[in-house]
Amino acid sequence: GAGVSQSPRYKVAKRGQDVALRCDPISGHVSLFWYQQALGQGPEFLTYFQNEAQLDKSGLPSDRFFAERPEGSVSTLKIQRTQQEDSAVYLCASSLEWADQPQHFGDGTRLSIL
Amino acid sequence: EDKVVQSPLSLVVHEGDTVTLNCSYEVTNFRSLLWYKQEKKAPTFLFMLTSSGIEKKSGRLSSILDKKELFSILNITATQTGDSAIYLCAVEDNTGKLIFGQGTTLQVKP
């Protein structure tokens, strides 16, 4: 596709439910990043893939957060046993190479935990 | 701890004004600095800066990096209402991840 595609655009879940957020990067982009953006703040790094390898997951806030990119293209961010503090916009970005290339962002998934 | 600080946090100007947005950083393993514009959806890429003193320009927008003093500025001349947005500054470290500032919210009034 022309840009990074994320789905769903909006997700409302009850506290304790599991959610899965999808990211479809720009075709041919090797690197894929997940960020979390709280209201009124800049995005914060969660995790990073180069092809199917998850090279950095230092930003994942807890072991309830899990990300995968099994075939080196589409990625899924899963949050188990959601809590209210998980409410945020989750942004996905992709880039042609692992560094020195600008990251291009999707529109994000706005997650609200009730 | 790595950090990126933007100022001002918010700014209101009138059409035709010139604005300067500031970004300072303390990042151990700096690779590049990027500016993004965020309206209601995805942050859209504006500039990527790697070398000091070389101005990058795109229409009414320009940006420059000072790696000695650890800051960057984004200038917008002859502002228009369509420039209203959040402007994000981010530093790329040597792992490739971006460290963002809080953003500057710019409102341009007609």
Image (cartoon, coloured by chain):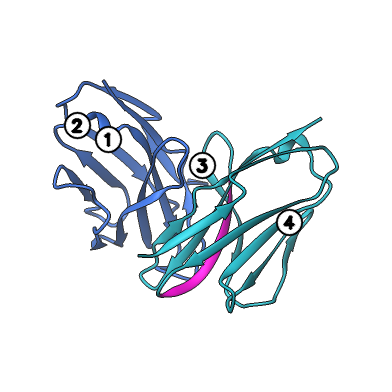
Residues under numbered marks 4 and 1 in contact, where contact means CB atoms less than 8 Å apart: no
Q: Disc 1 to disc 2, how far (Cα)?
A: 7 Å
State the cyan chain. B
State the blue chain. A
Left or right? Give the position of B14 relative to A101. Answer: right
Q: Which circle marks residue B75 in the picture?
A: 4
Where residue B69 appears, x then y in whole percent?
59, 74
Q: Is residue B1 visible?
A: yes
Q: Disc 4 to disc 1, how far (Cα)?
A: 35 Å
* Chain for disc number 1: A
Residue that badge 2 annotates: A82
Q: Please, what is the three-letter code of the amino acid marked with disc 3? A: Ala
* Chain for disc number 4: B
Q: Please, what is the three-letter code of the amino acid marked with disc 1? A: Asp
Closer mark to the observer between disc 3 and disc 4: 4
Where residue B38 appears, x then y in whole percent?
57, 42
Q: Please give the range of residues in magenta.
A: B29-37
Q: Disc 2 to disc 3, how far (Cα)?
A: 24 Å
Where residue A113 appears, x then y in whole percent?
27, 25
Q: Please, what is the three-letter code of the amino acid marked with disc 4? A: Asn
Picture mark count: 4
Q: Is residue B61 above or below residue A112?
A: below
Residue that badge 1 annotates: A86
Whichever of labels 3 and 4 marks the residue nearer the N terminus, that label is 3
| SS for callout 2 | loop
Quarter assignment of residue A59: bottom left
Residue B89 among those drawn in magenta: no
Residue that badge 3 annotates: B42
